[in-house]
């Protein structure tokens, strides 16, 4: 169990830093390509171990076309999230990594309106995360980027909410492996339909930043979901993922001069505190 947790921690820390490098060096349209291609490759490599999940999940999707449609819909939404995420990442790593707090809060509110009961502590957490996202929009590093980029931030919050709801619903009804496979297959097909030039595909599949980002993302997804449904409680894995937020924000200040590391530590500390309230 410790190996999974340590691996997941370093993957969660490395992923945004590698994607930041890609946003500075590569066409933003490469991100959906290398994410879907390397994730599908990773899933196919591990298929001999997860064949029962693939068979059972596929049967569930075939019997429930609505679930299959949601997987395909997630792929299309994911394309826009990947592309616009790189656009925002180029201007502000900290803003990109600060999408999750308000998105988690909004998704929790939607689940509450759909009948999921929240405790008082969870309501405090949701209110805190919403307020934190609101304040960051006007007082965080996001205020130093162009107005068009700030609109991208709001779009990404909405897209992330949609994907979180899809994740929760589809995995609950089927399983994580088939969900990753079909949503990334839909993402790759959508990339093909977009008819990008050869240069985009060549950069996505043959340059080291794209390969590093794609492989890191694929391993991150598998290491995240596999132990989470077998060995390790969801709250523990989620806590590890959230724990890197202050480190990523501090890195954005030290490496790319996004405010001061002290200010970024404050943002990261508050987000971690409210996340802890939601998970405890």
Image (cartoon, rainbow, N blue to C red):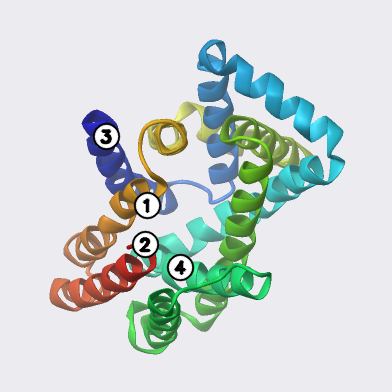
The image's mark for residue 191 is none
Q: Is residue 17 visible?
A: no
Q: Mark 1 against mark 4, which lies toward the viewer?
A: 1
Q: Mark 4 points at which residue?
A: 99
Mark closest to the chain's N terminus, 1 or 4 = 4
Establish if 152 lies above or below 127.
Answer: above
- Tell me the crowding category of disc 2: few under 14, some 14 to 19, or many 20 or more residues within 10 angstroms, Cα based: some
The image's mark for residue 7 is 3
Q: Name the residue under label 1.
A: 235
> How far separated are the C-alphas under marks 3 and 1?
17 Å
Query: Within the image, what quadrant is residue 63 found in?
Result: top right
Say whether residue 117 is left or right of residue 15: right
Mark closest to the chain's N terminus, 4 or 3 = 3
Q: Mark 2 against mark 4, which lies toward the viewer?
A: 2
Q: Mark 4 against mark 3, which lies toward the viewer?
A: 3
The image's mark for residue 279 is 2
Residue 81 in percent (x, y) is at 59, 57
Query: Within the image, what quadrant is residue 208 found in?
Result: top left
- SS assignment at label 3: helix
Query: Within the image, what quadrant is residue 152 found in?
Result: bottom right
Residues at circles 3 and 1 in contact by the CB criterion of under 8 Å? no
Say whether residue 31 is left or right of residue 196: left
Residues at circles 1 and 2 in contact by the CB criterion of under 8 Å? yes
Residues at circles 2 and 3 in contact by the CB criterion of under 8 Å? no
- SS assignment at label 1: helix
Q: Mark 2 against mark 3, which lies toward the viewer?
A: 2
Establish if 199 lies above or below 242.
Answer: above
> How far separated are the C-alphas under marks 4 and 3?
23 Å
**Nearer to the camera, 29 or 113:** 113
């Amino acid at each position: 169990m410790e190996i999974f947790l340590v691996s997941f921690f370093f993957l969660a820390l490395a992923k945004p830093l590698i994607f930041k490098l890609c946003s500075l060096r590569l066409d933003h349209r490469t991100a959906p390509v290398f994410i879907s291609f390397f994730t599908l490759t990773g899933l196919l490599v591990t298929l001999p171990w997860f064949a029962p999940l693939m068979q059972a999940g596929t049967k569930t999707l075939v019997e429930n076309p609505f679930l299959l449609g949601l997987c395909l819909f997630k792929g299309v939404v994911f394309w826009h999230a990947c592309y616009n995420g790189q656009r925002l990442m180029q201007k502000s790593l900290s803003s990109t990594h600060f999408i999750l707090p308000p998105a988690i809060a909004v998704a929790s509110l939607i689940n509450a309106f759909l009948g999921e009961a929240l405790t008082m502590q969870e309501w405090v957490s949701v209110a805190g995360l919403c307020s934190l996202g609101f304040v960051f929009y006007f007082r965080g590093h996001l205020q130093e980027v162009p107005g068009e980029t700030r609109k991208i931030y709001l779009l990404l919050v909405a897209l992330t909410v949609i994907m979180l709801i899809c994740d929760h619903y589809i995995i609950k009804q089927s399983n994580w492996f088939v969900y990753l496979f079909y949503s990334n297959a839909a993402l790759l097909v959508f990339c093909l339909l977009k008819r990008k030039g050869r240069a985009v595909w060549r950069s996505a599949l043959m340059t080291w930043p794209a390969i590093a980002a794609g492989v890191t993302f694929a391993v991150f997804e598998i290491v995240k979901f596999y132990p989470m449904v077998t060995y390790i409680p969801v709250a523990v894995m989620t806590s590890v993922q959230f724990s890197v937020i202050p480190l990523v924000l501090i890195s954005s200040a030290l490496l790319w001069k996004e405010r001061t590391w002290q200010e970024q530590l404050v943002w990261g500390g508050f987000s971690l505190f409210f996340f802890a309230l939601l998970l405890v």
